[in-house]
């Protein structure tokens, strides 16, 4: 079986070979090879023995993939071949340079710029709040505000573009 | 003792208070908002009263509604927990005038100590050392800029009515001052209904060390030793421990006595916490008094063997303290980690939503004060604290290892939490060595990112589940009868 | 310290030992039988080795297989837990000759103390009071009848290799003697491979009080105070507590010193328990030494703050005890309830099967040492102990209330447990008053039946679920991907 | 809605009336009336308010009914109208006078009588073991052993008749 599995921004090719015996699978992920024994403990729990070391993995479907817990960490694992071609990504603030979009569902508290304003990279544009915590969304590059697409008290979610900025000196044109 | 009390709070702290009530044979009344109809504290209570809409001002901060709920259910007393109305002197006063016992200090004491500048003046008079700073709060930004120039940067902007880092900003240079003041004012106005700010000189590399105090209605005052709460992010404590790695017997005496002076100077009654900053030199400064049960109270309970909520209730009924300072002993070492619903991979932005899977750590010396359960939707309206994981062991090192094991076995899927960040802190040599200062995170974990070593293991688990799930269909949230996370975030547009 | 150890046990005690190992940075190897491939201790370990078929003699009691598993995985030491091979001197000796550290006393000590009549003689010599009884064990029923006539009924039939009530019978009149001896012999033969029996005079209305001892390899011996384990059913402890309600300072000194004498007389090393019977008069008698970690060790851990498993490991590596008798303090009151899979509505017959739903109690001072999880099939082959619920609080009464709350919030569906029986004991005035004797159950709860007061609430819940389940189909075990209980009880004919 | 619900040996008539408002039901069970508010917390958990007092009830299907947990006690609740007319009941030893059947799955350790033996009420007939615990199954009445339908080491389950005894002086004939 072949998969392309994406975690955060990293997509890796995964090849899984049933290695004859019933409860064993050999995995090749990128350059690494893993020998894996397994047992489904319950619908949401696997007992894996990976190269001799036992781990308990928990998993459940959600969003566009599966949430998987191993060794104290949880990951959203997505099948890259089944993802919509382009969609609003859940990213850190620096990672989607053109978008001024909130990282989580939140409420707009304050809009600090107006249409036509010149803004500098890193300048605060909009303050949003969720769970009593305020976060300032900042300008991703120097530019001019061409549109403000939200209002104070609006409920906004990741993927919503709140401010459009025309880059002043685009590097790739 | 009371027959029935109302708990004017939600989540883990309301559940924790109710557990002691049940053990004392006291009936409990929960209050809740629309968003919390199936919250853990509602399930734990003997009765529950709807206060109103999810917005805190329309429910948990609505003094009238809370008083009416108490009167309607015949609750003789109200425990305010922490946050919300816990340090609101008007609320305490409303209880007093309605003939309901407020489980906490008298409204006058809350009012005095809640005014940070008045408290500073009071403590200076009582001989307790305080940090240089403004004695008057203001809503005039110009006055704040001027004071900051005079004191010299870095300065600390603080809300006069503040607490828990709300309305607080460190400002290291002039350019940041304007936005810092405006946003702190807005936050403070929202959180406490009072946007007044004042400035303090920034003490460099301090530890945050606080003393738990207990005072009865008969003038008896004791402290229950210190808690160190230096590990903070955005001025929010995330890890607390006791004893403080910096503590020495003589320092403990000095700070403990200062804490008792604070209690006596303010006429304190019930449980409270005296916060200090402790410099590497051993010099310490009074910061403020939190006039309520502290989030991190369990580490004191585990090391002293004293149930603080039980004592709060006993003190509120007028019972004198059954022990003196010298009767109180501390044993072992306890650490608490706060479990916040924040995404460590997205700048720690809050992560509300549906808890799809929840497996709690267990074992000797492990306590999980938890306000969520599998299938619960964590609301967007309230603090991101889901609960607190607490451990105790014989030594600091044993407690550190125990906490690491406990964190590594704590499964929460569906929403993001800071658990991986906590694990990395616990495992760091700086934490292991006890080098815990309030700039610990900035200094050691500023550029922290999620470790990806285990990503391949996660991919393996994904594939094994795919390959075996034909025989055993993987239950999705939907199949289990729950709405998906995006459906449950009421009225968000996507 | 060891890098890796093997835990030659299953269920809750194996899990508990592994938790301490993880906190000490020690790798763990689990062993398991066919029935236990997905047992909690297998999931908890770093590695797991299949020993063989489910029948204990073919797996957990198979000395060779266990030693081979340790050698194959490179485990430097073996922790035997309790039961199975824990008190088998041949096993300890096999470890010794294989160069594997046995985490427990030397085989010679286990052999001496395991021979109950030899132990009696040894203790008599050491000046420790013992109960009148036979000094020689026998498999000859005629000799037993004759001795019983001489001593006078009631007598206690005990297995010379026994423990935990196995092979033990109280016989109150001659007519019952034959069947009692035969069935005790068969049980002892099965459980210990030795059917020899002896008789003791029955002490009337005693309390069962035992002392935890710790001895290092350098001759240092301490005790960690007593545990009272009087609440027993069929000679199986079901509730234990510390301190004993009967304890006084002078009695504690006397019994503690007797416990130390026992340790010294036997050349004891590692953790052990000296069991006594305590008469209402204050007279006490040596019963036996359990040369291993006791089921009820957590109540000692909670009140003394000492991790007994950690100390067992340290002692096994030759580390001297870091404290003396006078350094050990006890605080508060702890109670343990054993959670047995037995049906209180069917004469407490064992109730193996699939755990359909499992919600553990939580909160301050609550510890659940648990060997099951939701979806686990409790095998028919092993002891019915699922786990132990332990609480600590400031006073006995607070601990009693805390345990009641914890038991009432412990949800186990699919198999039957003794939880409702435990709740009724905890709530009884006899228990509340501390009138705890080994005949407590016979005296107060002989005709106990399940209270049916809440049956209507159960009916209401049934109907509400039926009425609401159209929108939300109730997941049956089958739909959740599990086999139904009857399918999983391998090869039973129905 | 009407139900006849059986718990242990007690069957009760249950009438449930939706009392207008959405999340409230009035129950009449036997002579008692209950006003019940409810909320399904999860698939296996209900939050009930019964006459003003809140309780958390857990439930799951299993066997011939639903296991229900309330106030620290668990009950097997069966719909009496849907039960098979006659089947081996899970009962205490005294409750099924004619049957010598084990209360739980277990293994036969010892057979203490032979066909043709006269036995007295309460006399031990067969010893079975489960989870390392032995139990003696006793004669339900005075009589004569007419058949022994099991052997040592046999695995037996509730409902299996292990020994047949002809009653010596039957009361109802």
Image: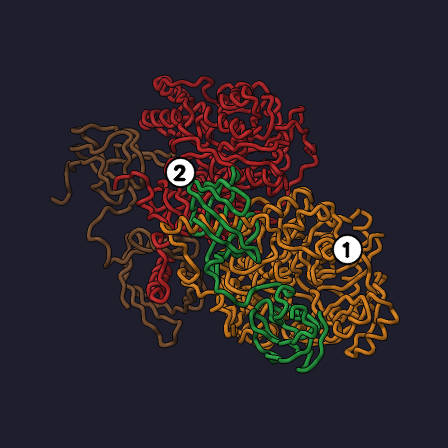
Chain colours: A brown, B red, C orange, D green
Q: Residue at x 83, y 61 (%)?
A: C128
In the image, residue D108 above or below residue C430: below
Q: Chain of mark 1?
A: C
Q: What is the spatial separation of the Cα atoms under label 1 and label 2, in whole angstroms?
A: 59 Å
Q: Secondary structure at mark 1?
A: strand
Q: Residue at x 71, y 57 (%)?
A: C446
Picture quarter containing residue A145?
A: top left
Picture quarter containing residue B493?
A: top left
Instruction: Give the image location of residue C256, x and y in percent.
Output: 78, 54
Of badges 1 and 2, the one in the foreground is: 2
Q: Residue at x 70, y 58 (%)?
A: C232
In the image: residue B411, left or right of residue A169: right
Q: Which residue in the structure is indicated by mark 2?
A: D20
In the image, residue B209 above or below residue B114: below
Instruction: Give the image location of residue B242, x and y in percent.
Output: 57, 41
Front residue (pair B117, C164) = C164
Badges 1 and 2, same chain: no
Q: Chain of mark 2?
A: D
Q: Secondary structure at mark 2?
A: loop
- Tell me the number on the disc at residue C207: 1
């Amino acid at each position: 079986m072949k998969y392309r599995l994406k975690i955060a921004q990293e997509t890796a090719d995964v090849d899984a070979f049933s290695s004859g015996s019933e409860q064993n699978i050999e995995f090749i992920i990128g350059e690494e090879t893993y020998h894996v024994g397994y047992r489904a403990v319950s619908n949401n729990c696997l007992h894996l023995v990976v190269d001799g070391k036992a781990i308990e993995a928990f998993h459940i479907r959600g969003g566009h993939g599966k949430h998987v817990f191993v060794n104290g960490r949880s990951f959203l694992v997505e099948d890259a071949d089944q993802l919509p071609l382009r969609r609003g990504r859940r990213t850190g603030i620096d990672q989607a340079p053109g978008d001024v979009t909130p990282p989580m569902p939140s409420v707009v508290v304050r809009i600090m710029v107006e249409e036509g304003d010149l803004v500098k990279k890193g300048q605060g544009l909009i303050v949003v709040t969720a769970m009593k915590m305020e976060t300032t969304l900042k300008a991703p590059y120097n530019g001019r505000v061409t549109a403000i697409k939200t209002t104070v008290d609006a409920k906004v979610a990741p993927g919503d573009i709140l401010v459009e900025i025309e880059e002043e000196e685009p590097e790739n044109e | 003792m009371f027959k029935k009390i109302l708990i004017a709070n939600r989540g883990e702290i309301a559940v924790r208070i109710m557990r002691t009530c049940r053990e004392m044979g006291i009936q409990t009344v929960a209050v809740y908002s629309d968003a919390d109809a199936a919250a853990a504290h509602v399930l734990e209570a003997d009765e529950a009263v709807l206060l109103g809409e999810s917005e805190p001002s329309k429910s948990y901060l609505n003094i009238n509604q809370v008083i009416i709920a108490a009167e309607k259910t015949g609750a003789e007393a109200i425990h305010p927990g922490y946050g919300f109305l816990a340090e609101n002197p008007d609320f305490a006063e409303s209880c007093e005038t309605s003939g309901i016992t407020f489980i906490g200090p008298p409204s006058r004491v809350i009012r005095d100590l809640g005014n940070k500048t008045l408290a500073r003046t009071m403590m200076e008079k009582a001989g307790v050392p305080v940090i240089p700073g403004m004695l008057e709060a203001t809503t005039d930004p110009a006055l704040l800029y001027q004071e900051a120039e005079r004191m010299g940067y870095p300065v600390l902007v603080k809300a006069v009515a503040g607490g828990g880092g709300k309305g607080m900003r460190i400002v290291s240079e002039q350019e940041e001052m304007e936005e810092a003041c405006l946003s702190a004012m807005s936050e403070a106005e929202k959180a406490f209904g009072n946007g007044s700010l004042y400035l303090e000189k920034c003490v460099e590399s301090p530890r945050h060390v606080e003393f738990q105090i207990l005072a009865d209605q008969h003038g008896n005052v004791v402290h229950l030793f210190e808690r160190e709460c230096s590990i903070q992010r955005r001025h929010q404590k995330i890890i607390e421990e006791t004893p403080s790695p910096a503590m020495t017997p003589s320092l403990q005496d000095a700070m403990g006595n200062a804490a008792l002076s604070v209690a006596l100077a303010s006429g304190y009654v019930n449980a409270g916490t005296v916060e200090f900053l402790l410099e590497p030199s051993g010099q310490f400064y009074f910061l403020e008094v939190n006039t309520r049960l502290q989030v991190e109270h369990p580490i004191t309970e585990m090391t002293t063997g004293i149930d603080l909520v039980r004592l709060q209730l006993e003190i509120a009924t007028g019972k004198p303290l059954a022990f003196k300072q010298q009767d109180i002993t501390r044993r072992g070492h306890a650490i608490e980690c706060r479990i916040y619903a924040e995404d460590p991979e997205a700048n720690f932005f809050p992560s509300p939503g549906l808890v799809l899977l929840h497996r709690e750590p267990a074992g000797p010396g492990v306590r999980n004060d938890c306000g969520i359960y599998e299938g619960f939707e964590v609301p967007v309206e309230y603090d991101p604290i889901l609960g607190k994981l607490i451990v105790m062991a014989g030594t600091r090192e044993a407690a550190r290892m125990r906490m690491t094991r406990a964190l590594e076995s704590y499964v929460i899927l569906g929403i993001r939490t800071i658990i991986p960040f906590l694990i990395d802190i616990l495992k760091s040599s700086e934490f292991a060595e006890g080098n815990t200062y309030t700039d610990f995170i900035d200094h050691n974990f500023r550029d922290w990112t999620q470790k990806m070593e285990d990503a391949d293991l996660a991919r393996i688990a994904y594939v094994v589940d795919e390959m075996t799930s034909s025989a055993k269909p993987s239950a999705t949230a939907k199949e289990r009868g729950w709405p998906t996370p995006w459906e449950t975030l009421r009225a968000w547009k996507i």
